[in-house]
Amino acid sequence: MKNFKILLFAGICFSVFVASAQGRRSVDWVHGLGEGQDTWAIYEAIFTAERCMNGYRAPGYTTGSGIQVFANQVSNRANSSTGFPRISNPRSIAIGHSMGSLAIRRVDQMDHTPNINSKRFGGIITVGGPNKGAGLVNSYEDGQVAYVFNDACNKLAAGPISELPFVLSLVANGWVREDVCDYLEDSVINPFLEDETGLPNATELKQNSEQINNINMYTSTVPRISIWGNETGPVHWRIASSFATQNQNDFLLVAVTDGLRGQYELQRHNNQMRGIISIIFGFWRPQSWFSSSVYFYRGTQWKKGRDWFDRSENLWNGLTRCHRWETTSFTTTYNPCMQFTTGTTPWINCLNATCPGNWAGCFYPTTYTTSVFVRRPSDGFVCDDSQILDGLPTGNVYEARGVNHSEETNTTHGNTLLGNDEMQDKLREIWTRPQSDFFYTPTSNLGC
């Protein structure tokens, strides 16, 4: 009997071990547009060591030739020999960032058979994917990007140019300003958008593109998860900071632009005060009145730059199309004489004519409906609704707070407002879902 109990206990332990040790699953970390092999390096290394998984990163997919070419390369690589079967592996996972999300979804669509055992990937995770398109591409194509940045150059240059002697300011307002704006566009704006992001060259990524609409028509049968980045404002300066510092610091340009905005406001205020003082002195020295007009003019020019800084985030959200109009209602008191100043003779005459003997009857609540411009949450490039796949249960949607599009593949420096490695935390939440869940992946110390 004692031996039987020992064997029974050993059998139970063995069963638990077998249940938890399902082997090392295959995980393909697919980079996005303009990215490369090192894009997912941090998390691939962390979780290959920590979890029962073998991570794989391609040397670099061809992302500039369209979604289909990209998807073909991902599919072909999934067929390659990597030490254990990956093709037709129902436990394999594909994780795609940005355009990579569309590529792995296209592979899933190409493997349209309902038999999950014949699919390249048993489950997919999209991260910051432009699943409904990236509005910035649309804005680039219709000329809005060039218009907004040219307008920014003009407004930011207005204050400094106004401080030049009169003749020089006239010249600067002409060809000098134009040359400066062209230089900024050719040397700063276009390299950032084209070289760093590649978005403007990827016409298939625009909203309502034929390729994206085709992918969205397909109803997937595999388990799916979306991680979406929700960057803290100002989103445009944070994402630019991340690109400029290779994700070391997403606050750098926030501090810089705050300082610049302060300088523009200081110059506006100083010129305004000089203008007021010149008016006062004008009573003794009439020529000071001319100086006051110059100072006031300069103040208005510096104000253009200050106002641009204040509006810049809304302008960027307009380019990425991460905004919406919401209808709101409010109730106020209305009376037919409200065009007149209260207590004046016209106001009293109006009330007597409209509501004789019953002024209270002239005041009644009225409800108005208006549209309000509201910023959509985004990762700085892609709006929340585009990043989240349609039809997902709430539990399969993960919000990466304080994370922009660049940081979605690496927040190990802990520079989000949460002060932690947000993306690592989100991925770990996925691996630690209930054991019955497809995405559950045990730690290596439990046995693989």
Image (cartoon, rainbow, N blue to C red):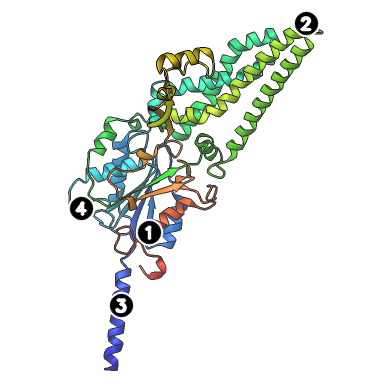
Q: Is residue 419 visible?
A: yes
Circle 4 residue: 118
The mark closer to the camera, 4 or 1, is 1
Q: Is residue 99 above or below residue 439?
A: above
Identity of the residue furthest to the front in this view: 357
The mark closer to the camera, 2 or 1, is 2
User: What is the crowding at mark 3: few (fewer than 14 residues within 10 Å), some, or many (at least 20)?
Assistant: few
* Spatial separation of the CA atoms under disc 2 and disc 1: 78 Å
Query: Count of labels shown?
Result: 4
The mark closer to the camera, 2 or 4, is 2
The amino acid marked with disc number 3 is Phe
The quadrant the C terminus occupies is bottom left
Labelled disc at residue 14: 3
Circle 2 residue: 286
The mark closer to the camera, 2 or 3, is 2
Q: Are marks 1 and 3 in contact (CB under 8 Å)?
A: no
The first of marks 2 and 4 along the sequence is 4
